[in-house]
Amino acid sequence: MPRRNRVRRAAGSPAPAPPPLTGGWQRLESAPDGDWLVRRVTGTGTTKLYRCPGCDQEIRPGTAHVVVWPADETGGIADRRHWHEACWTARGRRGPTSRRW
């Protein structure tokens, strides 16, 4: 008998709410260190090498990651940072490395 991989919900129960979106493909995250806009990047088509501020390791071209900037920023790219998704999730536990920005 084939197994079922889908989560079953009780009849009439609402679907889980998606994360709040602001303008399409980015989401707003609130944390003790402020409000942040977070955008997932698949990595396909990228040719640049980035450095993650959480672990100070390279994010190689083609690697999926997140781009993060302060929510109060109005279109400036100076405060955008590329993070590994796991490093961004764990930033409250370990914070950025002592690297030059």
Image: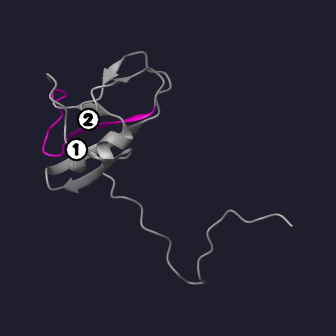
**Is 68 on the left-hand or right-hand side of 72?**
right
Which residue is the site of mark 2?
Answer: 54
Q: Furthest residue to the right?
A: 1
x then y, percent, for residue 88: 30, 42
Give the camera-side residue of 49 and 75.
49
State how far apart marks 2 and 1 are (Cα).
8 Å
User: CB under 8 Å between callouts 2 and 1?
Assistant: yes
**Is 6 on the left-hand or right-hand side of 69?**
right
Decide which of tag 2 and tag 1 comes sooner along the chain: 2
Q: Please report the residue visible at 14 percent of the width from the left and 39 percent of the height from the top.
A: 73
Residue flagged by tag 2: what amino acid is it? Gly
**Is 66 on the left-hand or right-hand side of 79?**
right
Q: Please report the residue visible at 65 percent of the width from the left and 65 percent of the height from the top.
A: 6
x then y, percent, for residue 9: 59, 77
| Crowd class of label 1 (few under 14; some 14 to 19; many from 20; radius 10 Å) | few
Which residue is the site of mark 1?
Answer: 94
| Residue 10 position (above or below residue 20) | below
Whether the magenta-drawn stretch holds residue 37 is answered as no
Q: Please report the residue visible at 17 percent of the width from the left and 51 percent of the height from the top.
A: 35
Residue flagged by tag 1: what amino acid is it? Arg
Please tell me whether mark 1 sits on a helix, a strand or a loop: helix
x then y, percent, for residue 96: 19, 36
Q: Quadrant of the C terminus?
A: top left
| Residue 31 position (above or below residue 59) | below
Please tell me whether mark 2 sits on a helix, a strand or a loop: loop
Q: Which residues are magenta?
A: 64-78
Q: Main secondary structure of the magenta part?
A: loop
